[in-house]
Amino acid sequence: MKVRHPEKINKPINPIKKKPNWIRTKILDSQNYFQTKSILNKINLHTVCQEANCPNISECWSKRHATFLIMGDVCTRACAFCDVKTGKPNSLDSLEPLKIAQATRELNLKHVVITSVDRDDLDDGGAKHFSKVIKETKKLNKNTTIEVLTPDFLRKGESFKTVVLAQPDVFNHNIETVPSLYRAVRPGSRYFASVDLLKSVKDIDKTIFTKSGIMLGLGETKDEILQVMDDLLIAKVDFLTIGQYLQPSTKHYPLKRYVHPNEFHEYKKIALSKGFLIVSSSPLTRSSYHADEDFSKMKKLREEQNQCQQPQ
């Protein structure tokens, strides 16, 4: 008779480590939180706050901030770190650009962040849809600045140019992790393709701020993190975000360690000394976390730089 070992029954693939006391979030204004939720539900829009299980959803929605997720809530890739659903997406919603524009106005957003799932099933990776959303949002919200967080448009030629030519104020594409971990963490992506995308955006339009982000705690080394910083600076990236990887479930890529806030502070100092215009680095930092405030800082810093460069 075969002996069953209780400790081996239903054992998780990758056990989730207990969160340290420095990773805590809270609702700041419950009335605003539920108003934001009501507006998004009414217009029937997806947000990365919900679909990616963002730890800052309570704080951001309490401030009536939300990051819109366009082109559905089903991704064509299966990145090992991401909590967004993977599968065969539905067809695009032709009314979505107008819905995003209306929600931006109803939430009275001064700065809006628009991201998407990967849509490798589309000939252009969704670039034309991004463009329509940007243009419609501008039309209905004259004083709102627009930040896009795009996929890599891998093997889609120069379709990304369509997004650039729609002139968002910020073009963000996350590098996510170091090159040595790409095969395990981002098997459908290519590190240098992402770096080249960011460089190409700047080559086309130098006035657009570019932005990228990396997660820590996946098993990367300090030297690898510094190399990513250098690669992004060569691509002329303005803004770097550095945050803690939080393992969504036992089926996702295993968290190696929780990085102490002091380390995040050290990386911020290093990145600024290397030449990034703005750096946001903390355990709870995410691409769109405090994006409106950071955009204002970034804009002011560039204006000061331009004044310094003018001949006396």
Image (cartoon, rainbow, N blue to C red):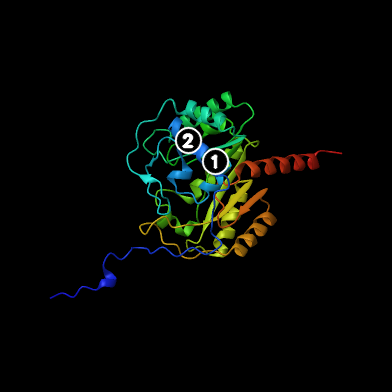
Which numbered disc flags the more N-terminal residue, 1 or 2?
A: 1
Kindly check if marks 1 and 2 are in contact, taking CB atoms under 8 A apart as contact: no
* Three-letter amino acid code at the position of disc 1: Gln
Q: Which residue is mark 2?
A: 38
Position of residue 254 relative to residue 293, above or below, is: below
Give residue 11's quadrant in the image: bottom left
Q: Does residue 244 appear in the picture of this structure? A: yes
Q: Nearer the viewer, residue 54 or 29?
A: 29
Identify the element where label 2 is drawn: helix
How packed is label 2: few (under 14 Cα within 10 Å), some, or many (20 or more)? few
Q: Quadrant of the N terminus?
A: bottom left
Q: Nearer the viewer, residue 21 or 32?
A: 32
Q: Which residue is mark 1?
A: 31
Percent of width and height locating residue 57: 51, 47
Toward the left, the furthest residue is 1
Q: Is residue 225 left or right of residue 207?
A: left
C-alpha separation, residue under disc 1 versus residue under disc 2: 11 Å
Identify the element where label 1 is drawn: helix
Percent of width and height locating residue 117: 43, 41
Position of residue 154 relative to residue 92, above or below, is: below
